[in-house]
Image (cartoon, grey):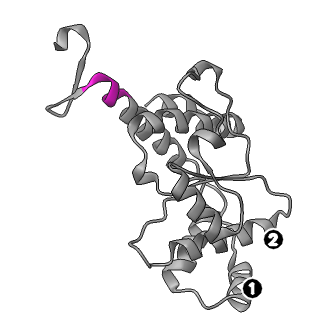
Amino acid sequence: MALDGALKGDNGYAYLAYNYDNESFAAGRVRVFLCIREKPFRVDPYIADFEQSNFPLAEKQREAIQQFFSNRFSIITGGPGTGKSTVLKAILETQFRIKAKSDVLLLAPTGKAARRMSEATGRPAYTIHSGLHISEETKLEDMQTVDADVVIVDEVSMCDQKLFAILFPRIFLFELQHFKQNFEGIGNLANG
């Protein structure tokens, strides 16, 4: 079976070639984002304003918001009831205070998750498929990149590898085109 390309191996493990390629692609894109360093943008005054008009945040929530505005790629994790939705709301309020006409795209893998995200933020949220205008018939080469100031995907753990393989190029290609001129050798990282 491996002779016809159906399997690929890495570190002594065998994978279906399709899964291996999708995982490698996603990991490579995350690696690119982690190599892009932004000048840290202090959002302490915005956080203080959010706390004054809402309620005090926990230190970890403040750190998550600061990290979001200091990096091109962020992952916010936590169990139920730990304040992820509050962090999301604070991030969005801060983004719109920094740039009032921000183009923000809120996505989730399912309709239920998109509705919860919209309820938590007071802003429209879409399923990944509807937000990116993709269907089963959509060909990868026909997809356009996402041109937004901020893209937030909630409940990413519910995404399978196929959805990641569709989502990541749409977001990352725009970012790579935007930053490529500033980072020598980024093409090698993007293919790694």
Left or right: 117, with 17 as reference point? right
Q: At which x and y percent is residue 179?
A: 68, 40
Give 42 or 13, whichever is nearer the viewer: 13
Residue 18 is covered by the magenta coloring = yes
Relative to 142, residue 94 above or below: below
**Residues tagged 1 and 2 counted as in contact (Cβ below 8 A):** yes
Tell me the amino acid under the disc marked 1. Answer: Asp
Of the 4 image quadrants, the one containing the N terminus is top left
Left or right: 24, with 71 as reference point? left
Residue at the disc numbered 2: 97
Relative to 103, residue 98 above or below: below
Q: At which x and y percent is residue 135?
A: 57, 29
The dominant secondary structure in magenta is helix
- Occupied quadrant, residue 131: top right
Binning the other alpha carbons within 10 Å of mark 1 as few (below 14), some (14 to 19) or many (20 upward) gives some
Residue 121 is covered by the magenta coloring = no
Relative to 109, residue 69 above or below: below
Q: At which x and y percent is residue 75?
A: 49, 59
Secondary element under disc 2, as helix, strand or loop, is helix
Dot placed on the residue nearer the N-terminal end, 1 or 2: 1
Secondary element under disc 1, as helix, strand or loop, is helix
Q: Residue at x 71, y 83 (%)?
A: 50
Relative to 50, residue 166 above or below: above
Of the 4 image quadrants, the one containing the C terminus is top left
Give 110 or 41, whichever is nearer the viewer: 110
- Occupied quadrant, residue 5: top left
**Which label was assigned to residue 49?**
1
In this orientation, does residue 164 appear?
yes
Q: At which x and y percent is residue 51?
A: 67, 88
Tell me the amino acid under the disc marked 2. Answer: Arg
Residue segment shown in magenta: 16-21
